Image: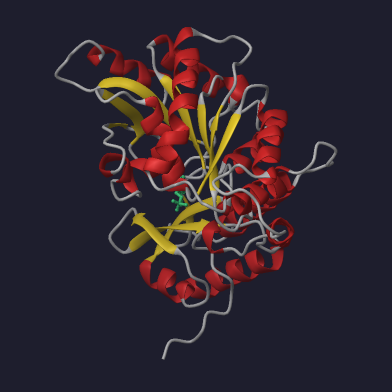
Amino acid sequence: MTEPRTLPPFASDNYAPAHPDVLAAVAAANDGYAVAYGDDPWTARLDARVREVFGAGALAFPVLNGTGANVVSLTALSPRWGGVVVSDVAHVNTDENGAPERVGGLKLLACPSVDGRITPDDVARWAGQRDDVHRAHPAVLSLTQSTELGTVYPLEELRTLTHVAHDLGMAVHVDGSRLANAAATLGCSLRALTTDAGVDVVSLGAAKNGGMLGEAVLVLGPDAAPDAASARAREAAAAAVPFLRKATMQLASKTRFVSAQLLALLGEPDDAEPLWHRNAARANAMAARLRAGLEALAGSDGDGVRVTRPTEANAVFATLPRPAADRLRAVARFYDWADGETPDRVEVRLMCAWDTAPGTVDAFVAAAADALA
Ligand SMILES: Cc1ncc(COP(=O)(O)O)c(C=O)c1O
């Protein structure tokens, strides 16, 4: 019989419980009857709060999960003949079982990436096939922020990317499953990272940020310097998303309970530090602590732990000998990510969550030292 693991998992921030304030908000929304399908007071309040946080004109459409948010967003932005430029490691490309293709009928155009980020040159390269009827017309750029590999697009780089995309007539979508972690790392507002950076539509994550269930599609309002491609994309998305949300089975009858969770995370205007930030900052800090602990286990001749990617949000990637990884897995669950530098090593992904405790991180590092011994 397998011994029960002694530490909480580092497998995914989705394994974490919901934050008690989120649960309290759901309980408070359980207040008698309310109009179904989003015509309720909690969703109206969410709409208003989203405009306060993301800027005038922003629209919020609560959905059931992150894959659904991505499919609804991208389907709203891409014409039937269009393509969606994404990084090769984008969740939409690798981890959604083809939902964008099967449900949305989308064509994904994958770009090589470094540590999960694609560059403006990678985007500009698609210009060549804009007028070729034999190829999908590059219509949307979808960026993940923070990326699947735990990195973050800095604001300046993001602005350049949206600029290049809009110049090519493309709309810009952000898979913001972990948008909060990116904003906490960059020390900026959610608005600075989206509306003000020229992003058109966002899949706003909640589950990985202390939510229980549900996310939202945000169609953003005009930014400081609207351009034609952006204005067209936002207008088309605002008209299409309500219908697509239903057509893709992402409209919850009791939407009020999803809205209540998002409201709890976004907080009140007078909150010194809203819950989204507290949760994300904690997860990021624990990842930094974990990285530092693992770096001390490098060993003398490459036989220890090697951290493989920048730690800019709440994920740490590292390689270690396979037998040591298996011993460590018996202590706390985590996923293998890729092969290591040599056949006897494996790259693992370690995720921290809003409730990861410093003591858990330290105990995991100590267990890693034992596993390597
Ligand atoms: C970057 C990213 N986008 C989207 C999703 C999809 O979320 P869901 O599992 O709720 O469909 C995930 C889930 O892990 C993710 O990591």
Q: In the image, residue 334 lies at what x, y percent?
A: 47, 65
Q: Depth check: 30 or 286 in front?
A: 30
Residue occupying image coordinates x 70% and y 59%: 32
Q: Point out the image quarter for the N terminus.
A: bottom left
| Looking at the image, residue 50 lies above or below residue 63 | above
Left or right relative to 240: residue 101: left
The colour scheme of the drawn protein is secondary structure
The quadrant where residue 129 appears: top left
Left or right relative to 133: residue 175: right
Q: What is the number of callouts on the image?
A: 0
Q: In the image, residue 27 lies at what x, y percent?
A: 71, 62
Q: Is residue 253 visible?
A: yes
The quadrant where residue 80 appears: top left
Q: Depth check: 280 or 132 in front?
A: 132
Instruction: Looking at this view, name the residue that lies furthest to the left.
Output: 134
Q: Is residue 143 visible?
A: no
| Looking at the image, residue 31 lies above or below residue 62 | below
| Looking at the image, residue 167 lies above or below residue 309 | above
Residue occupying image coordinates x 37% and y 41%: 247
Instruction: Looking at this view, name the residue that lies furthest to the bottom.
Output: 1
Residue occupying image coordinates x 29% and y 18%: 126
